[in-house]
Image (spheres, grey):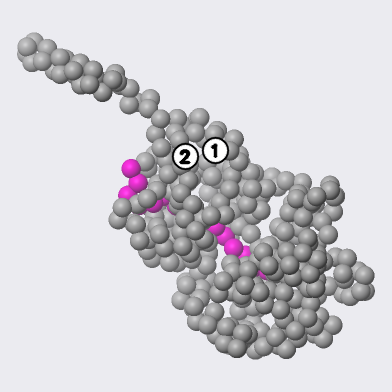
Amino acid sequence: MKKSLLILIVIAGILAACTGQSPDATATETRTLTVMTHDSFAISEDVIAQFEAENNVKVEFVRSGDTGAALNKAILSKDNPLADVFYGVDNTFLTRALEGGIFESYQSPLLAQVPEEFQLDSSFSALSIDYGDVCINYDKAYFEDNSLTVPTTLEELVQPEYAGLLAVENPSTSSPGLAFLMATIAEFGEDGYLAYWQQLVDNGLVVVNDWETAYYTNFSGSSGRGPQPMVVSYGSSPAAEVVYAESPIEEAPTASIVGPNTCFRQIEFAGILKGTQNRDLAEKFIDFMLSPTFQEDIPLQMFVFPVSTEAELPVAFQDNVDIPTQPATLAPDLIDANREAWINAWTETVLQ
């Protein structure tokens, strides 16, 4: 017995000498947690540093294109996952993610602070992190200078006084453009939305390919000084006008139309990727994303809203953003089944 024990001690000593580590060195070794995101992801460095320090971990982010491209990458690599956590799938792609079987279930205790309206996955595979509304933004000065009443419904946009005043993005090339298309389907139904779009076209609708062109070139209410005083943008855009103003301003020059079904709500989710070798750290990171520290950093980094009721909004949001009380929504499975057909039908109606 004593001889065998001596041999084991000698072997352990030789291994430690070869690796340069003490036998228990791995217990304090810094681990790495990999998070796959879309390209728009942003969070403060000091917030991530806090998580890293508290958990002795290095967090690496893998930005993988827009939401659709990042999700496709996660699905194609699910047998050999490229990350431990995926952040950024939204409710327009949620069904595809769940059917792709890329997530492991985790019921974070911090979900108790998230209203049920944001918790769309009862299997707890995809946990809601933030949300935002895509709305029609308008140039306050234009409507005031022209003594024109701001429309409050989608129906009013086809009236003659608003001819040529609205710029929208192509839903086949733009996320906010797709969201606005969803809002019209929620409001007018699958049988009525194309007739509505034809009315918009007849009333001088302007269509561009992307949000940057629509907001900064066509829209008159921002730096573009374009010809259209209404544009499809984000409900948080007025807050961004204040935060990024070249000279300090107290009130946003723009506002959003937030009547019933005029804004489409996008909810973003995160999940633990199936096959992760860092399940314990992945759970901690999900909890951290739902904590007030991370949630309160979201608005000024990505200009979306926290889902936790424990998080406070920054002053720029409190003073300049109107949150719709009745946003347009569609069931994720309905969107997933019809997205391409709706876009193709829209293209034939609006662009042909």
Magenta stretch: give its range. 263-277
- On the image, numbered disc 2 is attached to which residue? 59
Mark 1 or mark 2: whose residue is earlier in sequence: 1
- On the image, numbered disc 1 is attached to which residue? 48
Mark 1 residue element:
helix
Mark 2 residue element:
strand
Residue 236, percent from left and from top: 71, 57
Please name the residue shown 66% across and 84% down the image. 197
Residue in front for this viewpoint, 278 or 36? 36
Query: Can residue 165 be seen?
Result: yes
Please name the residue shown 49% across and 78% down the image. 340
Q: Residues within 10 Å of mark 2 (few under 14, many from 20)?
A: some
Asked if residue 84 lies left or right of residue 204, the reply is left
Instruction: Give the vertical position of 188 relative to 97 (above or below).
Output: below
Disc 1 vs disc 2: Cβ atoms closer than 8 Å? yes
Residue 265, percent from left and from top: 62, 65
Residue 295, percent from left and from top: 61, 45
What's the residue type where badge 1 is placed? Answer: Ile
Q: Is residue 169 magenta?
A: no
Query: In which quadrant of the rendered view does residue 350 lie?
Result: bottom right
Residue furthest top in the image:
2
